[in-house]
Image (tube, grey):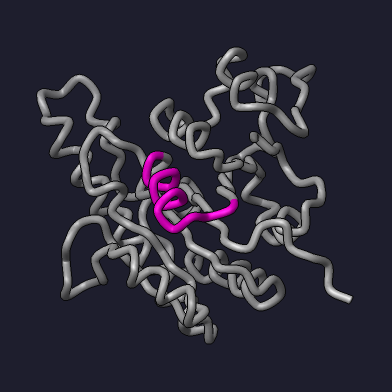
Amino acid sequence: MKQKLHYKRVILKLSGEIFGRENGKGVSISSYINIAKKIAKIKKESKIDLAIVVGGGNIFRGRENGEERFSKAIADNMGMLGTVINGLGLQEALEDMGIPARTMTAIEMNEVAEPFILKRALRHFEKDRVLIFAGGTGNPFFTTDSAAALRACEVNADLILKATNVDGVYDKDPHKNKDAKMFKKISYKEAIEKDLNIMDSTAFALCWDQNKPIIVFNIDKIGDISKAFKGESFGTLVS
C-alpha cells in the first residue's frame, strides 16, 4: 500500500551554483544532467506536481557588481537572463531522460521559452510535465527566493523545498561553529525573532502570509526529498 502524500504540488528552489563547474561558476552540461537524473527519479517515484525555480548565480549575480558605478537594475536583469540559461539546460537534460518539461519565464522571450501564464502552467501540471520557472519575478531588486514564494502562491503549491549547502536551519553557522544546533521544525515567527535568514525578507513574509511551509535541506540529499512528500523527517520544516 502506497504511503499517502502530505504534499502533492511542490516548488523546488535550486541555486545557480549547482549548475556550474566545481567552483560553482560557469555552465556545466554534466551538472544539468546530474541534477536531472535525481529529479527524474523523484518524479517517477512520487507522482507529484513538480515545479523548479532556478537561480543564475553560476553565470551572474546582480549583487556582485560591488562598488563599481553600475546600475543595480541592469545587473539584476543580467542575473535574470542567467536563470533562463539554467532553465533551458535543465529542461533539455530532463527531456533527454524522458521527463516532459517546460521552461516558463517571467520575461517574454517567445523564441526561447514560454512566458509564465498561470492557466497554462496549471495545464502543464495536468499533463504531468515538470515546470521550470526562470527569469525570477521579471523585476529587478527581487531575488529568486521571492520568485519561488510568488510562484508557490500563484500555482497553489503545498510546499517550498529550498536546497542549501547545509542539512537544514541552524541556530548559527555550522561551517564556523561546531556546536551549532539544527532545528527539525521552527515557526515563521521564531525564525524571524532568531534572525535565521532562511529566505530574503520579502519571500519569507509572503510565505508566512500565505501559509506556505518551507523545508530547508542539503542539496547533496536531493535524492531523498520524497521523504518530505510523505511527511517524514527531512531537513528543517518552517511552518
The residue lying furthest to the top in this view is 193
Location of the N terminus (image quadrant): bottom right
What secondary structure prevails in the magenta region? helix
Does residue 46 sit above or below 61 in this rendering? Answer: below
Out of 35 and 31, give the one closest to the viewer: 35
- Residue 155 within the segment the image draws in magenta: yes
The residues colored magenta run 146-158
Residue name at image x 66 percent, y 30 percent? 169
Q: Residue at x 67, y 51 (%)?
A: 220
Indicate whether residue 195 is drawn in magenta.
no
Q: Is residue 17 visible?
A: no
Q: Quadrant of residue 27?
A: bottom left
**Which corner quadrant of the image does residue 188 belong to?**
top right
Residue 136 lies, in percent from the top left, at: 31, 48
In the displayed structure, would residue 168 be above or below residue 91? above
Question: As displayed, is residue 67 above or below residue 151?
Answer: above
**Residue 18 seen from this side:** yes
Q: Which corner quadrant holds the C terminus?
A: top right
Can you name the residue that lies furthest to the right here? 1
Percent x, y of residue 214:
60, 41
Query: How many tags in the picture?
Result: 0
Instruction: Pick whichever, 176 or 113, lies toward us.
Output: 113
Identify the residue at horizontal 43%, vertical 54% (top origin).
Answer: 53
Q: Nearer the viewer, residue 31 or 168?
A: 168
Relative vertical location of residue 194 with respect to residue 66 in this rendering, above or below: above
Q: Nearer the viewer, residue 118 or 22?
A: 118
Q: x and y percent of residue 67 in the render? A: 20, 19
Estimate the x, y position of residue 191 in percent, counting from the top left. 61, 22
